[in-house]
Amino acid sequence: MLKKDKFILAIESSCDETSVAIVKNGNEILSHFIATQIKSHQRFGGVVPEVASRHHIEEITIGIKKALSDANFKISNLTAVAVTYGPGLVGSLLVGINAAKSFSCEYHLPLIGVNHMAGHIYAANYVKKLQFPLLALLVSGGHTELVYMPQRYKFKILGTTRDDAAGEVFDKVGRVLGLAYPAGKAIDELSKSGSDTFHFPRAMIKDDNYDFSFSGLKSAFINTVHNADQVGKKLNKNDLLASFQNSVVDVLTTKTEKAINEFSGIKQFVLAGGVAANSQLRASLSNLIKDYPNIDFIPAPLKLCGDNAAMIGAAAYDQFLQGNFSHLDLNAVPNLSFEHY
Ligand code: KG4
Ligand code: ZN
């Protein structure tokens, strides 16, 4: 352990994962606890906020203890404690924030409040040190955003979804076909044996902006399924899902290409968020970037695409270097956006 090494205990509890990690210098995971609540929410077809908060309360202290013991780490060697303070579910965020504040108070450690979406981008820091300017496509259950970072910890949203987020539509169309929540991974797998025979709409693909809209695609999908049901027609499930996925991937790739062409000098292109685990999306974007030899494509590691505390620790390290600390009045900001920076 060198004197200049920084060790951050990071906490993430914004949605349905309670996670705690110990991160060294923003790019090395010493321990990582992730308790997922998916099973509890599955029977409701989505996350129930009240149930989520209760689970976080049960898991948070267990997680902190486990992260410290797994890394065989002495609290006195910690440099700071970091926590997600938004965006997310208010009750869930508050559990992590209160745990982090108590920890910070008890052990006299600086507190760092982290934006969850910034965390998703910093998951890529475990693959390669982030270099600026960079472009990031953030695709998760609650967000679809193209983000430009001119320098460390500066974010400019180029475009966002006007309605449903990409992950949200994956989960909703999956539900119509009876797939368990969250349906993204299953759709990814089933699509591999289907093809784009339905040619669903690709909303806003040619528009002169970086915004997205996926609710029309969702309606087209649901109407196709219901119309077939009404006349007793059986549709090929894999083709339906492949057609849906092709539409999402096509729009995301086309808008990314537009941004890459219009923002010169981009060094890296980061793909992050839960939907970044999608194999077709990863392949399509990797193929796109081949035409831009000066841009490094960095998809977040598969294990760090979903919500996790390691990504929060990586983002917190950059905040630490900037002296960007929080006070004990840190509160949950459920609709926190990059514009707050
Ligand atoms: O980032 P995340 O774990 O949670 C939020 O912050 O929202 O994203 C969860 C979303 C879910 O909608 C899930 O269906 C989707 O990521 N997802 C996928 C895949 N794996 C997870 N979507 C498409 N393809 C996948 N392989
Ligand atoms: Zn997330």
Image: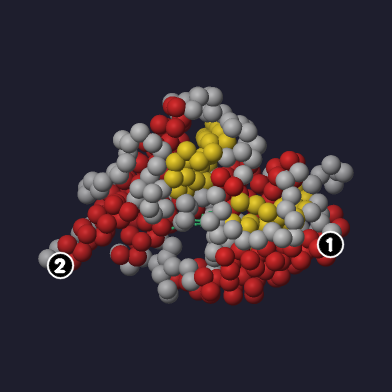
Of 159 and 16, the residue lying toward us? 159
Q: Do the residues labelled 1 and 2 touch (CB within 8 Å)?
A: no
Q: Image quadrant of residue 9?
A: bottom right
Q: Position of residue 121 (x, y in %)?
A: 57, 44
Residue pictured at 69% horizontal, 59% vertical:
330
* N-terminal label among 1 and 2: 1
Mark 2 falls on what kind of element? helix
How far is disc 1 from disc 2 in space, using C-alphas? 63 Å
* Few, some or many residues within 10 Å of mark 2 (<14, 14–19, 20+): few
Residue pictured at 70% horizontal, 66% vertical:
98
Q: Residue furthest left?
A: 231
In the rendered view, tell whether residue 262 sits above or below residue 196. above
Mark 1 falls on what kind of element? loop
Query: Across the whole image, how many numbered discs are drawn on residues?
Result: 2
Q: Which colour scheme is used?
A: secondary structure
Which residue bears the numbered disc 1? 107
Amino acid type of the residue tagged 1 in the rendering: Tyr
